[in-house]
Amino acid sequence: MLHDPKGGSFRFDAGAVCLDFAHTGGEGQYAVFETLHEPADLGEWLAQPPLAAVMTVPVTARELTAAKTLRQAIWDAAHAQAARRPLPAGTIATINRAAAAAPLTPELAAGATTVGWAPPVRATQALSTLAREMIELLSGPLSERIRECASDNCPLVFVDTSRPGARRWCAMERCGNRHKLRALRARQATAP
């Protein structure tokens, strides 16, 4: 669920957890969308599904800074890939540096019906897991399906996992409906 600082919210599925993470705030004009103000905010975000990485070691201010740096790199890489531009070298280096840390280790729970993360669970491990997912996304078969919303004023990026590969909007209930409404009004204005 994404929340607009001007009010309102909408469901948004970026198609990859690393891209969901990229939409937790940002720099410059995107600072108004910031959700990771304190280390505890990062811990809360990581604990939410689908990652569901409940920290067993408190998140530090250094990890929060590293998270924001990785988030910006994921954002920049996704936008470059969506525009079919080369990825900036600094962006690649940041993602690779985060991925080099030990990732979260999956652990089968008693009864073998659920999976969790083996303790200790640290933010650095979760960030490594997100960076590795971004590497797989950029180098895998879905890399050509990374898209930016087709709306003129929406910068959200997503992986188009639809079967025909024809997704255009961040969310039909937001930008898709706005486009349909504008098209309808334009047709009505030109109708005799």
Image (tube, rainbow, N blue to C red):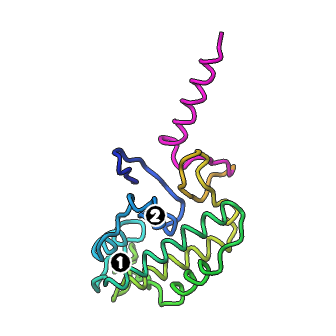
Q: Does residue 22 lie above or below 3 as drawn?
A: below
| Residue 28 drawn at (x, y percent) | 46, 63
Where does label 1 land, which residue? Answer: 111
User: Dot 1 surroundings within 10 Å: few (below 14), some, or many (20 or more)?
Assistant: few
For the point 51% across and 84% down, which residue is it? Answer: 98
For the point 47% across and 77% down, which residue is it? Answer: 69
For the point 34% across and 81% down, which residue is it? Answer: 110
- Secondary structure under tag 1 reads loop
- Secondary structure under tag 2 reads helix
Where does label 2 land, which residue? Answer: 28
Q: CB of mark 1 within 8 Å of CB of mark 2?
A: no
Q: Does residue 188 lie above or below 22 as drawn?
A: above
Q: With 58 as the anchor, is 17 left or right in this view?
A: right
| Residue 123 drawn at (x, y percent) | 37, 82
Q: Say which of marks 1 and 2 sits in front.
A: 2
Q: Picture quarter containing residue 147?
A: bottom right
Q: With 10 as the anchor, is 155 left or right in this view?
A: right
Q: Looking at numbered disc 1 in the image, what kind of residue is underneath it?
A: Gly
| Residue 77 drawn at (x, y percent) | 61, 70
Q: Hey, which residue is sitting farthest top in the picture?
A: 192
In this view, the residue in front, 84 or 136, is 84
